[in-house]
Image: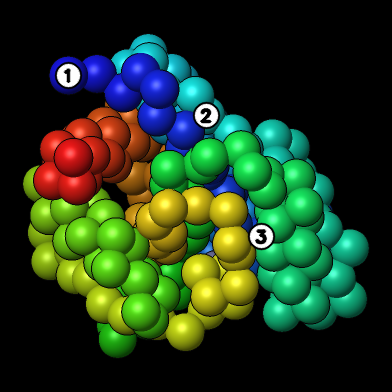
Amino acid sequence: MDLKGKKILLDPGHGGAHPGKTHKDRQEKDVTLKISKVLENLLEEEGATVYMTRTRDKDFGGESRDEDVNERVKYINKKYAGKGIDVLLSIHVNTDRLVSRVGVLYPEKGKASKILAQNLARKYGTFMANTGYGEADLAILRDTKVAGAKALIETGKINQSWYDDDEEVERAAFAIVAGFYDYFREIE
Ligand SMILES: [Zn+2]
């Protein structure tokens, strides 16, 4: 099996005026774009068709972080309507607080999304121990209407130094690719 014919939409979280989480000079918006680009290449090597909500440092015109997400949702629903996207994955980094979790979130009432989240969490757990998964009421998951399954991954905490190591970023992306494989195997 490869990922030929599979359409995957990657959403690098934040961007432009909305940096997301920060730690010293590391900003979530840069990290999510870096991971997404590595992931895009790996998925294309496996035969998938990959779309990206952004490929550079930009926002979607919202005044606040939440408004910007709503603008992003509108953009996604307009741009990718009818494209037959199999999976939407929004990529994020969590805070450095002790209670912040690494894991995969899926929308309520999303049966395929739950299966996606389980498989992504299981495989991401080979890269980062204690990767969980759970339901979440987030606009990017709740209000986007173009994908068969949707998930958001918190890839780690913003103070973790592996984000600066290209090999580690590639390992993280590989784990996500493996999760996609397991998902498509399970639903087919
Ligand atoms: Zn985020």
Q: Nearer the viewer, mark 3 or mark 1?
A: 1
- The circle on residue 1 is 1
Task: Identify the mark at residue 50; answer none if there is no mark.
Answer: 2
Distance from Cα at disc 2 to Cα at disc 3? 19 Å
- Which residue is label 3 attached to? 14
Amino acid type at circle 3 is His
| Dot in front, 1 or 2 | 1
Identify which residue, 61 or 80, lies in the foreground: 80
The C terminus sits in image quarter: top left
Looking at the picture, which amino acid does disc 2 mark? Val
Contact (Cβ within 8 Å) of mark 3 with mark 1? no
Q: Earlier in the sequence, mark 2 or mark 3?
A: 3
Quarter of image, ligand 1: bottom right
- What is the x, y in percent for residue 40? 48, 28
Q: Is residue 78 visible?
A: yes
Residue 134 image position (x, y, % from top left):
26, 77
